[in-house]
Amino acid sequence: MSPTPPINLSVVIPVYNEEGNLPTLFSRLYPVLDALGRSYEIIFTNDGSADRSCELLAVQHAARPDVTRVIEFNANYGQHMAIMAAFERVRGEVIITLDADLQNPPEEIPNLLLKTDAGYDCVGGARQNRQDSAFRRYISQLVNWVRRHMTDIQMTDQGCMLRAYSRTVVDGIIRSGAVNTFIPALAYSLAQKPTEIPVAHEERHAGTSNYSVYRLIRLNFDLITYFTTAPLQIFTIFAMFCSGCSFLLVIVLGARRLYFGPEEGGIFTLFGILFFLISVCMVGIGLIGEYMGRTYQVVRNRARYHVSHILETAE
Ligand code: UDP
Ligand code: MG
């Protein structure tokens, strides 16, 4: 097989149960990219959708085989693995990621390209007037705060997936072989000249978010644990503080017992302290488990995802 000539732009879109959004996405995205006057490809990864997304993508591939590629997963592996699979196959010099639900307007793509053309290798979108539930926004604020204080990753809006990367950054992401990760943060850590631009944010065009509270917690744990072991260290420091305090308490209680004799009701105070310490231990065990589970996944070295088939571009 002869090597394929490099193209200018690759747009990567993860798709999971987006049948209600795909037709509008196609009708808005392709004209924007056609108008750029650059060579481009769009790679959709169908992340095990149970609805008609797969058929819609196949029809679109048949309609625009010159610029459309579809990677079909056999099951649902999550948004970041869907992006990773596309990254491993991109041909573009610049790579843009986008959500399929039209929360990231495709019309913003030219603005991202202005920055990559100016030499920035990682251009993040910072969502203006974010159109998500208040709950989601609060979670983001909290995680942003934790990430800012515990890791070296400094960005305004880590959750926005409308981003542009240079080929070098994407190659670095692939080489990292990350199993549980958060692509915008990983890209930032590999970039030499990152920047951010404000981007519009729209309400989900159709359907509901694919992130339940449980998936959101898992994703944010991925973000923190991948980039830092600070939670383990903070826990150790806290555990040292607790053991220091309990040591003092034992001395005080012992002295009290010797001077004043047995006290009424003191046992309940002790139980209170004991329960608190046990709960601290449980949090610690859970935290160590999180890190161990992730280490295990890497050591086990199983395939991160399985591709069932690929629809390639045709000239
Ligand atoms: N997505 C995916 N696999 C998943 C969950 C989501 O490929 O397991 C895709 C989804 O189709 C969309 C993007 O990731 O293109 C963002 O998902 P969603 O809109 O549900 O997340 P939110 O905007 O609520 O963060
Ligand atoms: Mg969305």
Image (cartoon, rainbow, N blue to C red):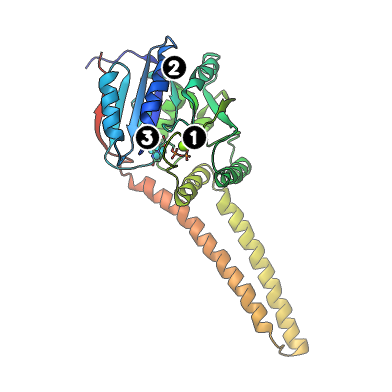
Residue linked to disc 1:
186
Residue linked to disc 3:
20
Q: Which is nearer the N-term, disc 2 or disc 3?
A: 3
Residue 128: image quadrant is: top right
Left or right, 25 with reference to 305:
right
Whether 186 is drawn above or below 232: the answer is above
Left or right, 161 with reference to 55:
right
Q: Secondary structure at mark 2?
A: helix
Amino acid at the residue labelled 2: Val
Q: Secondary structure at mark 1?
A: helix
Whether 149 is drawn above or below 100: the answer is below
Amino acid at the residue labelled 3: Gly
Q: Which is nearer the N-term, disc 1 or disc 3?
A: 3
Label 2 crowd bin: few (<14), some (14–19), many (20+), radius 10 Å: some
Q: CA distance from mark 1 to mark 3?
A: 31 Å
Q: Is mark 1 within 8 Å of ligand 1?
A: no
Q: Position of residue 261 (x, y in %)?
A: 74, 90
Q: Position of residue 220 (x, y in %)?
A: 51, 45
Q: Is mark 2 within 8 Å of ligand 1?
A: no
Q: Position of residue 286 (x, y in %)?
A: 49, 59
Q: Nearer the viewer, mark 2 or mark 1?
A: 2
Which residue is the extreme one toward the right?
259
Residue linked to disc 2:
32
